[in-house]
Amino acid sequence: MSYKDLLLSFKRKSLTNQLVIIFAVIMLVPLLALMYDIFFASQTDRVIFLDKEQRLTALVKSTNLELSIKLDSLGIEPEHISSTLLHNEFTQVVEPYIPSNSGIRFGLYVPLTDKITVLGFLHNYRNLSPEEETLREREIFDNTKSGLVAAEMGNEPLFRISGSLDDQVVEYISPVVVKGKVVAVMWAGERLNPFFYQSSFYRKLLRYFTLGVLALVMIATLRTIKNITSGVDRLKQGLHRMENDIHHLLPEMSGELGQVARAVNRMAVSLTQKEKLEDQLRQSEHLIALGRLVTGVAHELRNPIGIIKTLVELMKQEYSQMTGIEEFTRAIDEQVERQDMVIQELLDFGRPTKVAIKECSINDLIMGVLSFSAAMLRKQKVKVQLQLDNKLPKILADTEKLKQVFVNIIVNAAEAMPAGGLLEITTSQTDEMIIINMSDTGEGISEEEMLKIFDPFYTTKEAGTGLGLSISYQSIKLHGGMIEVDSVPNKGAAFIIKLPIIS
Ligand code: ADP
């Protein structure tokens, strides 16, 4: 498998697997280093000991041999060799070795008398007080005693480390045998440099510490991998949901993934806004075409209605004597009046009347509209709650048209709450817009209906014309603003009007 194939197969793996592989490769380096260190550190320790062991063994062996030959040549039975003789002979054999073996201490132990002879000195690596020195010596002898006894009983040489007061002494102990009998035990000892012990102690400590840190790093990295991959999974699921429905935004996340999620959410929101704007544009085009049609129809209707009006007037004069005629003419009048009103609304819709722009305060306009609709709202048991921003700037607008928009929305709200409810009106501002929010607690509007309510003639009411909102829509457009609706069926509807601040 070539390097490229390897890279390709790595790239094809899931993010979790990729991270685990990277992690394993990274961890391999310190693990190998640690293993190397453990292996070689123990090797170094062994080499140091081996060196000392060989030196001491060689010394003890040669002095022991010399002593044994000397004792043998005396021709005395082992049980008759006195302790003094042994010590004298030992001193004679060992003394020449002392000058060339500084730092090594030779000793002889005679089990029969429990007497010890010591020649030579151990290295002194630190200054001790005389009391400490005696204490240390005693401890070393105490410790050595067990080794001496062991060597005597076992009749076998022994290499070992004994210690006291932070000192470590290596010893080679060997039995002195005459005619197959152990007559004494001799040994040579050497003190290890405390630095060596300390550094070996710290090396050990460092190794455990590194091992601990590695374990911690491993746990932390695995946790991070888990966090990252679970974040990526959440992102993946969120994107999948978003694919089906763009309104499903990605969940809030921390870190870089959070930044990605927020950027995607912003894109989704601006995409929906764009779609909304496109919808509004389509609606405007639709309205313009309808407007033309409607004006034509209204004109056609106005003439015959005018004739009917005149004829009724004539009937009233001509047949004033006839009983019951008044009832008929009044009914005709009422219907003619109603038709006239509808025709006027149609004309308003199709051919907007002249615009009369003046400086006005939106809050004042709302208060004005509320004052003359107060009676109607009271009758409908509608409570009004106002939250008007008194810092709103004055704007240039057609006050009559805006009033009509507010009236339309307020009347619709009241009609949507036949058993009464709450109408909340708030005004606020951004840098460029004044925002008017009118929300009610009425029956609400379904999503499907929301697409149609600004269409002319769309109504769900028996006596409705379906023109109120489409005229309002046009009026707000005329001001360079926009009108939006938001609703939860059976909970209420909110109409949001945004008007540009043009002072
Ligand atoms: P009309 O009031 O004559 O029906 P509109 O254009 O004013 O005409 O309203 C169109 C339709 O929008 C209404 O028939 C109604 O179904 C719906 N609508 C408007 N405002 C609300 C509201 N606040 N709550 C519920 N539905 C509403």
Image (cartoon, rainbow, N blue to C red):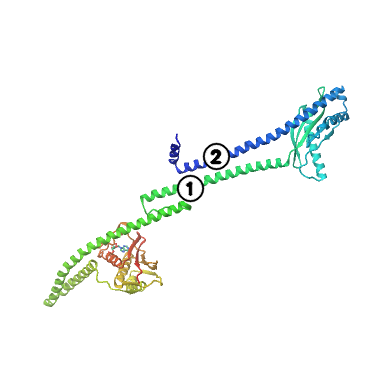
Left or right, residue 359 beside residue 110 = left
Residue 269 place in picture, x, y as percent = 38, 56
Q: Nearer the viewer, residue 344 or 46?
A: 46
Residue 418 place in picture, x, y as percent = 32, 65
Quadrant of the rendered image containing residue 502: bottom left
Separation of marks 1 and 2 at Cα, in angstroms: 22 Å
Query: Where does the C terminus fall, quadrant-wise?
Result: bottom left
Secondary element at image label 2: helix
- Give the total of numbered labels: 2
Secondary element at image label 1: helix
Residue type highlighted by circle 1: Ile
Vertical relation: 112 (above or below) 284: above
Q: Which residue is mark 1?
A: 228
Q: Nearer the viewer, residue 58 or 80?
A: 58
Q: Earlier in the sequence, mark 1 or mark 2?
A: 2
Q: Nearer the viewer, mark 1 or mark 2?
A: 2
Residue type highlighted by circle 2: Leu
Q: Which residue is mark 2?
A: 28
Residue 436 place in picture, x, y as percent = 36, 67
Quadrant of the rendered image containing residue 287: bottom left
Please tell me how crowded label 2 is: few (under 14), some (14-19), or many (20+) other residues with Cα within 10 Å: few
Query: Where does the N terminus fall, quadrant-wise?
Result: top left
Q: What residue is drawn where x is 84% and y is 34%?
A: 117
**Looking at the image, can residue 457 be seen?**
no
Quadrant containing ligand 1: bottom left
Q: What residue is drawn where x is 65% and y is 35%?
A: 43
Left or right, residue 344 beside residue 180 = left
